[in-house]
Image (cartoon, grey):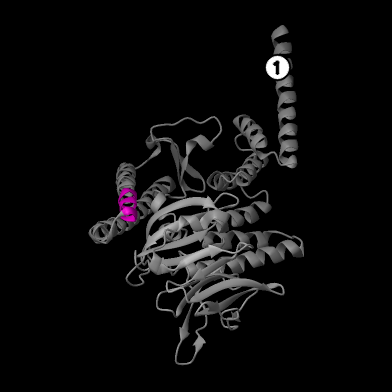
Amino acid sequence: MRKIIFLISFFWFALVMMGQTHSSADRLFQEGDYAKAQSEYGALLKSYPRNALYLYRYARCAQELGDLTTALRYFDLSGDRYDLKHFYVGEIYLQLWRTEEAIAAYQTYLAKSNQSPERINHVNKQIRFAEKLQRYIRRVERLQVIDSVEVALDSMLYAFPLSHEAGTISLDTLGNTIYVNQRGDRKLWSEKVDTQLYLLSSHRLLDEWTAPDTLPTTINFTSKQTSPYLLNDGVTLYYAANDTNGLGGMDIYVSRYNISTEAYTTPENIGMPYNSPANEYLFLLDEIHQVGYLATDRFASEGKVHIYSFAIPEYKQYWKNIPVDSLIAYARLEQFERGIVDTTIHNLSTLPDSNADEIGGIYFVINDSVVYYSTNDFRQTKAKEMYHEWVRINDQYLSEQQQLHSLRQQYAAADEDEKKELTPTILHLENNQNQLQIQCEQLLQSIRRIEIESNQQ
């Protein structure tokens, strides 16, 4: 009898404590303390690993904390009880530039939900943006990135070691860039006129500058134009503008002055990987050193920008016939600092109460309902062998990636002869990385096909 009373008391105490944890987790979540809420939902999931609410809230916490991979995983595990899940999944996929998945998630949300007109309008706007982003991603220029540094936005000009022949860039008192060409007789800058920021031009005659001349509406086609840069040919103009038809924020555009017609051509968005949904502030091409520079706040801390330096290509080449994930990585300018990332391979440390295992601290998603936590979970020997081959190729990729990063650093500090010597090796490694990514993608698809067929038998 005493034993029964003890067990009843124990279970009653456990229920009370669990209820308190649930209430505390909900309160923290509603207050926006997502780090502590995630910890408490993780504790609840140890006792109730299939509870849809806990899984959904754990995913939301991960999303708010910026751990998008974990968020996607837990949204998937939470099932379809909460329609709003599809909205958040769409937001995450769009943030990752995975447009097809984003559109599919948004459409599922619209089909399942009876939401306010404001939310529906937002989702439809996101779908249209995803479709636009998708068009840009299909045409990504190949680029040999040399280096990337993060600097304060208001001091970014110090990160451009331009040659004298490339002209000079400075800031006015309002923080707008002023470009002066190498001969010192042409000046371009941005200036606020009424509520708009226009590009202006002036020429130097003897010791005086001519009166400012506002560039035509061909160039000043939107509410904000800034950061002009003119190539040595005197006709090719790059600048930043906030066109609503662009990718979002400020994008880089190029226009050329036609001497015969004395008019500028219609500005063209220079596309990816130069532009993104973030802000691109400045684009420079130092033709003497054959190095270009791009200032953007993508992936940058608040108040800072990333300065990407890259080798000026002899001619334009576009990525073709590569996995979508790889194409997105190149478009986002991540290719020189990332390994082969498959969305179904994740770090086990994101799971509550998990430990590294034989598979190397990861878990492998075969499909929506089958997850492997160890190489012992593979049912087919062939699939297991393919997985080990994937590990080998991925390790080769990472090793060559380090070599490529080192060569790019050498390239940045090299003279012209050394650059010519390094270029073939860098291009060879870049092409080989592309092939390794294709091999990995094919292996992952084969592994899933074999294991799915085996699980269905």
Q: How many numbered badges does the structure rendering display?
A: 1
Read off the magenta span: 405-413
| Residue 91 in picture, x, y percent from top left | 61, 56
SS assignment at label 1: helix
| Residue 59 in picture, x, y percent from top left | 61, 44
| Quadrant of the frame with the N terminus | top right
Q: Mark 1 points at which residue?
A: 10
Residue 454 included in the magenta stretch of the image: no
Q: Residue at point 48% right, 36% down?
A: 348
Q: Is residue 430 above or below residue 402?
A: below
Is residue 19 among the parts visible in the rendering?
yes
Identify the amino acid type marked 1: Phe
Question: 360 and 247: which one is in front?
Answer: 247
Q: Residue at point 66% right, 42% down?
A: 57
Q: Residue at point 45% right, 64% down?
A: 273
Is residue 286 among the parts visible in the rendering?
no
Question: 333 and 218: which one is in front?
Answer: 218
